[in-house]
């Protein structure tokens, strides 16, 4: 019991600290840029959809589990794109969810395309006190109730791409927004701003091999800067194989396959090298996309 409690506290501190990083962390961001930048909406020049599930720190009680769904598309004959996405996440006794709409204005330049995207929606957080074990039944926190808080949330992103290069930047949770949990503590739900810069390219090494390097830099007040460095290769225009290194001491092995002309399947496995490594069997992420 004590061991499980300690592990749960570690999970909550590392994954849901309201003074640090709050947004879900994905390994396959290079195949799903819309998740981190609303300016990406419509950039595939087709209706594009994504289903993604991430099971973090497998075999650890209370570890984060995140599911997302998204769809976005350019509007025919217009200079803008629209998108819709939602997510559901569990971390120990807490759950977070949200649903968001995206509008992106796209400009055609001589060398590529530049887009400005705005995403807005509703973010909800629940905390189930009945899932906690109390040594003292008289503990005032032991009400067994589900406490909730909700707040609007807005993101902004800029995205530029050519046939061989992309660069983008985004900030999430704009403004001093927040909700109040509906219990006696009246604790405020605060969404800290997340700043992300990303860039990458695609280089044809031969008729059967394309090299795609990319980097993703993320900053949240109260947390260390997190940098992902990725290298992947497209083989025979069929399968992507790659790996990424994250400065938070983890490595991800990544695969994406073009199942049909319009459907893609991806998988990643994360290996961590921090204090949690002895308590779990890594993280798994599944991805299904279509265009």
Image (spheres, rainbow, N blue to C red):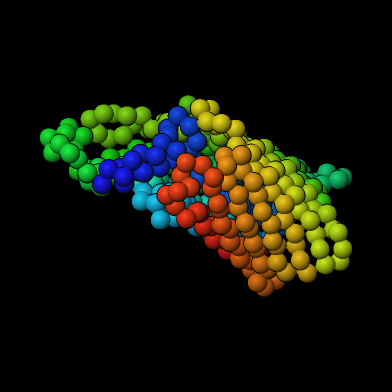
x, y percentage for residue 97?
Answer: 42, 47
Relative image position of residue 154 (x, y in whole percent): 53, 37
Q: How many marks?
A: 0
Which residue is painted at 39% across and 39% down in the image?
A: 10
Whether residue 68 is visible here, answered yes or no, is: no
Identify whether 189 is placed above or below 124.
above
Residue at 38% from the left image edge and 32% from the top image edge: 189
Is 75 placed above or below 96 here? below
- Residue 127 is situated, as x and y percent measured from the top left of the image, at 31, 42
Left or right of 44 on screen, residue 86? left
Q: Viewed as shown, does residue 71 lie left or right of 113? A: left
Task: Please tell me in which quadrant of the rendered image residue 136 appears.
Answer: top left
Asked whether the viewer can see residue 182, the reply is yes
| Residue drawn where x is 40% and y is 56% of the image | 59
Which residue reaches farthest left? 138
* Left or right, 11 with reference to 238: left
Specify whether 51 is left or right of 147: right
């Amino acid at each position: 019991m004590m061991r499980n409690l300690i592990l749960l506290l570690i999970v909550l501190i590392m994954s849901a600290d309201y003074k640090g990083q709050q947004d879900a962390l994905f390994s396959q961001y290079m195949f799903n840029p819309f998740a981190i930048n609303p300016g990406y909406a419509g950039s595939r020049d087709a209706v594009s959809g994504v289903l993604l599930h991430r099971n973090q720190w497998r075999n650890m009680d209370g570890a984060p589990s995140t599911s997302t769904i998204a769809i976005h598309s350019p509007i025919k004959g217009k200079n803008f794109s629209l998108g819709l996405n939602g997510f559901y996440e569990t971390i120990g006794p807490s759950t977070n969810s949200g649903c968001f709409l995206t509008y992106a204005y796209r400009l055609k330049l001589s060398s590529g395309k530049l887009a400005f995207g705005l995403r807005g929606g509703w973010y909800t957080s629940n905390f189930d006190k009945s899932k906690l074990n109390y040594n003292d039944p008289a503990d005032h926190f032991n009400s067994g109730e589900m406490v909730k808080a909700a707040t609007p949330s807005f993101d902004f992103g800029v995205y530029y791409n050519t046939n061989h290069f992309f660069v983008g930047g985004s900030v999430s949770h704009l403004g001093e927004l927040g909700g109040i949990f509906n219990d006696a503590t009246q604790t405020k739900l605060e969404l800290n701003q997340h700043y992300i810069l990303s860039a990458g390219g695609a280089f044809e090494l031969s008729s059967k091999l394309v090299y795609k390097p990319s980097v993703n830099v993320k900053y949240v007040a109260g947390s260390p800067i997190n940098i992902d460095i990725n290298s992947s290769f497209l083989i025979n225009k069929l399968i992507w194989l790659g790996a990424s290194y994250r400065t938070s001491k983890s490595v991800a092995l990544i695969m994406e396959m073009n199942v049909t002309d319009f459907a893609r399947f991806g998988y990643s496995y994360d290996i961590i090298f921090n204090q949690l490594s002895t308590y779990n069997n890594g993280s798994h992420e599944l991805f299904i996309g279509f265009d």
